Amino acid sequence: MQSRRLLTVLLAALMISQCFSVVAIAEEQESPVEISMLCMSYSEVPDMNGPFWTEFQRLTNSKLNIQFIPTGEFSTKLDLMLAAADFPEVVTGINVNAVNIGNAIREGAFWDLTPFLGDFSQYPNLGANYETGVFDYAKVDGKIYGIPSMRAMIDPSIKLRKDWLDKLGIPVPTTMDEYKEALKAIVNGDPDGNGQKDTLGFIQHGFATIDTAFLVAFGGFQPTYDDEGGMIYKNLTPQYEDLIGWMNGLYAEGLIAKEWSVMKNTQAEELFTTGMAASYERNIWRDYPFQTQIQKVQPDAEVISLPPLKGPGGYAAWLQSGYIGMGVISRRVPEAKVERILRYYEATATEELNFHVYNGIEGVHHTVVDGQPQLTELGVAEVTATCQQPAALISDPWIKTVTMQAPKAYNDAKKEEVAIYAQVGEKDPFAGIVSETWLEVWSKYDSEWQEMTVKAVNGVISLDEYHTYVEALRSDPDIKQAFQEFAQAYETFIGK
């Protein structure tokens, strides 16, 4: 009798165990979530069936249909998609304070993710990101509309050809004035020795980069208020006018490219990496690959990130806000699928996925040398900034400083070299605040303002004329109202 009871108990336990096993297998075998996405491309359009993306999708249990758009064309393409209300399920690499995105959010184009995320107990990986404060930059009217993609605060730098400084007997500049004088000496000094005055000074890719590190050196990231207590938008401050005056001086002396305002990042990068230009602003990690590329035509090339240059209002060190853009989910996506997309993003915020995004597969994209992944030739080609776009990632303070293309000793030295950026650099105060009035009215002025700014830099109009123009904008009632909203939003933001 006891044997029968024992057998019954064992059979029951086996059945329960099998049931749990079936449930576990069912959960493990949940079909991959299919997601259509719009992402920026910083390199050649990747092969989604190649080893890198096959592993990426395995790690995140996803099947991604990504439309990659080159960075220089992304904004225009997105504007057209938003106007036609025809865009993929997820749009990445955007910011809530951009005019087009802010308007789209207020018009109901994207899901409010606040009730889905809740207290982040169902999304502990994203919750760890939340603790760093990056989700504050994803909010409109206190509601979360996007999943931020994590990024180190120390990121862009002003690069300069150290070998050319040495050749001309010029010390590494430490101030904005010394930097200008160094550019002048290089441009006029035939550093490549070809007997021609054809070396370019500072290269920047397009109009947008005019207000980054240089603006910080002029105090442009310091909150500035009008007589009524409104917080003046950064591009309309007196500091920005000072920057334009400085840029005008560079242009007049031939120290920046004549086509600076329309140059694409691919064009600017090519000029720098073929040894045609002295200085360029990009991510710190690019110092090593840029240097190795230039050495193919100029073997003695040495690229350095300058120390933060002291200017009249600060240092040329632009700190990121801990993220670089975010992914928003189209309101046309069914509610149940929103949760699956969030689970996908949860899976992209792990150490394993982070390692894969920056290093690829061992034996394919990297080998291990001195305890550090070293990218192979295939890894250099395939493991690019494009790989980071569809992921939330996790925080790593040095991820934009080091590169797995470089030896460990080089990376260690680079970290020590740029650590000062965190001490003297500044974050953009407008990165996390939104003014509804600004979103509504600035689109009417933006194109004209850009045109006038380019004319001021290029000397087509005088700096006094530019000042008069900007003064008129600052006096516009709608813009003044936007300044008031910025002031209120900033007070709320810094009080968090």
Image: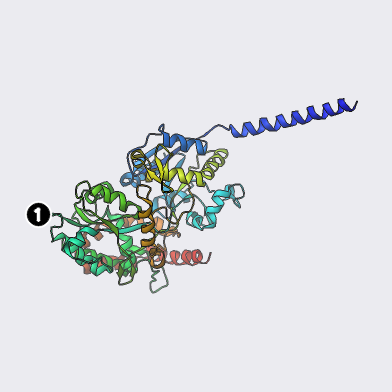
Residue 437 lies in quadrant: bottom left
Instruction: State the residue lying farthest toward the front.
Output: 370
Identify whether 109 is placed above or below 199. above
Q: Residue at x 42, y 41 (%)?
A: 360
Identify whether 461 is placed above or below 377. below
Q: Residue at x 32, y 51 (%)?
A: 286
In the displayed structure image, the side of residue 96 where residue 168 appears, left or right: left
Which percent across, then down, holds residue 380?
34, 42
Instruction: State the residue lying farthest toward the right.
Output: 1
Which percent across, then down, holds residue 253?
15, 63
Which percent across, then down, holds residue 381?
33, 40
Residue 415 lies in quadrant: bottom left
Instruction: State the residue lying farthest toward the left.
Output: 195
- Residue type, mark 1 in image: Gln
Which percent across, then down, holds residue 70?
33, 43
Q: Is residue 347 visible?
A: yes
Nearer to me, 331 or 378: 378
Q: Is residue 390 visible?
A: no
**What is the crowding at mark 1: few (fewer than 14 residues within 10 Å), some, or many (at least 20)?**
few
Query: Which residue position is annotated with label 1?
Result: 196
Q: How many marks?
A: 1
Disc 1 secondary structure class: loop
Nearer to me, 470 or 415: 415
Question: Which quadrant is the N terminus positioned in?
Answer: top right
Q: Residue at x 19, y 52 (%)?
A: 276
Nearer to me, 32 or 482: 32
Instruction: Indicate how the structure is coloured in the image.
Output: rainbow
Identify whether 31 is placed above or below 288. above
Identify whether 58 is placed above or below 225. above
